[in-house]
Image (cartoon, rainbow, N blue to C red):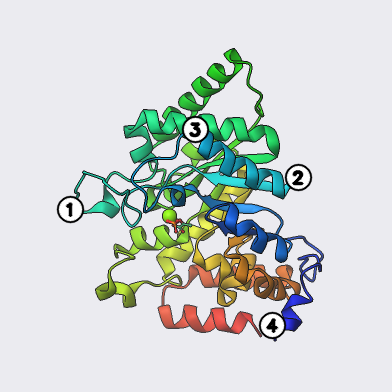
Amino acid sequence: ERSKLKRLKDTPANTLCGEHIDLLVNIEGPKDIAAARAVNADGVGLYRTEFLFIGRDSLPDEDEQYEAYRSVLKTMGKRPVTIRTFDVGADKALNGNTRVEPNPALGLRAVRYSLAEPKMFRTQLRALLRASAHGKLRIMVPMLAHAHEIDQTLALVDRAKAELRAERVRFDESVEIGGMVEVPAAALALGMFVRRLSFLSIGTNDLIQYTLAIDRANEAVVHLYDPLHPAVLKLIGATIQTGARYGLPVSVCGEMAGDPAYTLLLLGMGLRHFSMHPANVLEIKQQVLRADVGELAPKVQRILRMDEPMRVREAVERLAG
Ligand code: PEP
Ligand code: MG
């Protein structure tokens, strides 16, 4: 089975109707690039930069970050590399973090943390922009909920660009900035983000956590964590549709994208960009190769209108034929 999958490495990920589906990888750093190349991924859909300092006592400085980002961009060549700004807080705490929060998942994490630590954010943005000269960088902002969070981030990007220009440091002037849809508020009021961003990526891990109000790290409620909950599917479906309406590419980079049980469902919702652990790429490609999107779309539209969990589950299983 493994060797049969291996043979798919150089097969283009096209559906039966001939549409190409982007199969991207989630990485934690340069160490994962070999695995991405081994499956011939179309690019990096999510680089979780917080792994640069998890378990360390000090933040990496600008040059250390620049080296890590540049090495990934260089090896990926013309393929896009989506680097997420630090997603610190909640399940990814910093060593020596002195902030203690009663509800860390609802606390100062991700873009909120970066905006509260402007020196740290500036260092990362400068490192990212400098690295943008070496490949096709896209910068992605995690956990957006408010329009002013992206406005402040874009202002900081502009300021970092102005600094680098003054220092005569090269960078990609047109680097794309995108955001993650991980909070239900963002999915429900997407208009305020599409006007400000170049691409969207759905973080289903957090979107499910926040939609269903279950801590994804709490064993006691893990049985309630359900990607097929009708509310979750409606938010994912609406995000993909809004992206299409505004001409903004949408990907899914949560665990759902790497689970073959959901590939046909997501394709039927209109998803064309999947980002996952490198180990899942070929298995997902196998699903893509057998997908008839024209046939799936109306079936999935019916699923999105269902509100009985058992029926949703059965209907999703039936998509596989
Ligand atoms: C997600 O929330 O789905 C996601 C991809 O981000 P992380 O798992 O790193 O929170
Ligand atoms: Mg997340």
Viewer-side residue, 36 vs 209: 36
Find residue 308 and report its horizontal and vertical position in percent: 41, 78
Mark 2 in CB contact with mark 1 (< 8 angstroms)? no
Q: Which residue is mark 1?
A: 102
Residue 59 position, x and y percent, is 39, 40
Label 1: few (<14), some or many (≥20) within 10 Å? few
- The residue mark sitting in front, 1 or 4, is 4
For the residue labelled by badge 2, is the local secondary structure a helix, a strand or a loop? loop
Residue 167 place in picture, x, y as percent: 58, 15
How many marks the image carries: the answer is 4
Q: Is residue 199 left or right of residue 50?
A: right
**Disc 3 residue crowd, few under 14, some 14–19, many 20+, Cα 10 Å:** some
Residue denoted by label 3: 62
Q: Secondary structure at mark 3?
A: helix
Q: Nearer the viewer, mark 1 or mark 3?
A: 3
Q: Is residue 56 above or below residue 311?
A: above
Which residue lies under the disc numbered 2?
Answer: 78
Q: Is mark 2 within 8 Å of ligand 1?
A: no
> Helix, strand, or loop for circle 1?
loop
Q: Is residue 24 above or below residue 261?
A: above
Query: What residue would you read off at disc 4?
Result: 2
Q: Residue at x 66, y 44 (%)?
A: 73
Q: Secondary structure at mark 4?
A: helix
**Residue type of the residue flagged with mark 4:** Arg
In the displayed structure, would residue 195 be above or below residue 81?
above
Mark 3 C-beta to ligand 1 under 8 Å = no
